[in-house]
Image (cartoon, rainbow, N blue to C red):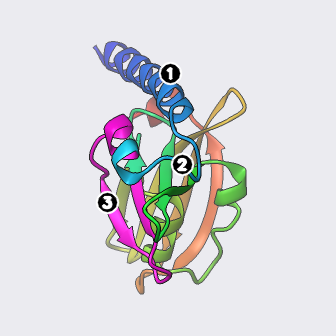
Amino acid sequence: MRWMKAAMLAMIGWLLAGCDGQRIAKLEEGLATEADVRREFGEPERVREDGDGSRTLEYSRQPAGRQNYLITIGPDGRMSALRQVLSPRYLQQVQPGMTQQEVRDLLGRPAKRVPYRLSQTEVWSWRWLDGQQEKIFNVTFDQDGRVQSAGSTDELPGDRP
């Protein structure tokens, strides 16, 4: 039964990735509007108001997928950036001392959050692909909600949500 659930989640992730590619191809930076983005991707999971008048729309594919998209709409109402942030470029930016909010703003919603009461820590995990290798990126936060450590491991069959 467990293998069926894992296979189904893998298939959903594969389908989402294929659909996302088609959606992304329809959106051109500098021309697409927020309405165009919402038509292709639907309602965002979260909208962040940025200090420069732009807005960042978050589209998470966690836990079944391995992507998180952050799409920036400039003050002019046009898409200025579309980023798939679960990649080495963004994961390497997570540094000790960052707050939970800073990590969430950088990487989007994690696939899993696990609190550890005895050590007063919490671990957030994201599923991502390094080439064809399935990985898990874990961030451990201390009792003050600041990054204590971060790093990736290979995803094992038992790691799947």
- Of the two numbered discs 3 and 2 on the same chain, state the one appearing first in sequence: 2
- Of the two numbered discs 2 and 1 on the same chain, state the one appearing first in sequence: 1
SS category of the residue bearing label 1: helix
Residue bearing mark 2: 31
Q: Is residue 30 above or below residue 100?
A: above
* Span colored in magenta: 37-58
Nearer to us: label 3 or label 2: 2
- Which amino acid type corresponds to the residue marked 3 in the rendered image? Arg
Residue 46's disc is 3
At 71% across and 62% down in the image, what residue appears? Answer: 92
Residue bearing mark 1: 18
- Which amino acid type corresponds to the residue marked 2 in the rendered image? Leu
SS category of the residue bearing label 3: strand
- Which amino acid type corresponds to the residue marked 1 in the rendered image? Gly
- Of the two numbered discs 1 and 3 on the same chain, state the one appearing first in sequence: 1
Q: Would you say residue 84 is visible in this rendering?
A: no
